Amino acid sequence: MRNRIQNGKSLNVLLAADISSGDALQIGDLLGVASVDGLSGETIAFRVMEVFNLPKTTAQVIAQGDSVNWDASAGTAGEVTGAATAAAGDVTGFGTAHEAADGTTSDVDVLLAPGSGVGS
């Protein structure tokens, strides 16, 4: 195919701020994970597919298969619920919980789903 660019599992991103490998990074309606450390002004690979362990609010319970939101101000993942209202800058439904996370853990494994997130 002449029009194929790449497999889409990662994107090259020009950084606006320093970042560490494994940190979540939000760009518009897209959430991904930095594959390497990078400094502001550098371009790095940004993983947008696969399963990643992301921080969550400890008290939140997330069931396996639940749709997951990204709270931009807190830098945490959380369950999508009917009562929850996304704040400006949040990304709703950016992925799916790969495993359940109970109210005693501070992280959750999320299968990133590019193209499914919606910014607020």
Image (spheres, rainbow, N blue to C red):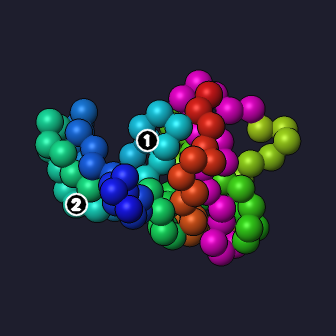
Q: Amino acid at mark 2?
A: Val
Q: Is residue 28 left or right of residue 10?
A: right
Q: Is residue 69 left or right of residue 48?
A: right
In this view, the residue farthest toward the front is 2
Query: Dot 2 lies on which element?
Result: loop
Q: Is residue 39 left or right of residue 116?
A: left
Which residue matches tag 1? 26
Residue at x 59% of width, y 24% of height: 88
The mark that comes first in sequence, 1 or 2, is: 1
Q: Amino acid at mark 1?
A: Gln
Image quadrant where one finds the N terminus: bottom left
Would residue 23 be visible to someone looking at this image? no
Q: Nearer the viewer, residue 116 or 108?
A: 116
Image: 41 above or below 2:
above
Q: Residues within 10 Å of mark 1 (few under 14, many from 20)?
A: some
Image: 78 above or below 64:
above
Residue at x 53% of width, y 37% of height: 29
In this view, the residue farthest toward the top is 88
Residue at x 18% of width, y 45% of height: 43
Q: Residues within 10 Å of mark 2 (few under 14, many from 20)?
A: some
Relative image position of residue 50 (x, y in whole percent): 48, 69
Q: Tell me if residue 26 is in the magenta stretch.
A: no
Residue at x 28% of width, y 44% of height: 13
Q: Is residue 10 left or right of residue 19?
A: right
Image quadrant where one finds the C terminus: top right
Which residue matches tag 2? 36
Magenta-colored span: 85-100
Relative image position of residue 96 (x, y in whole percent): 66, 62
Gap between marks 1 and 2 measured at Cα: 15 Å
Q: Quadrant of residue 110?
A: bottom right
Query: Dot 1 lies on which element?
Result: strand
Q: Tell me if residue 90 is in the magenta stretch.
A: yes
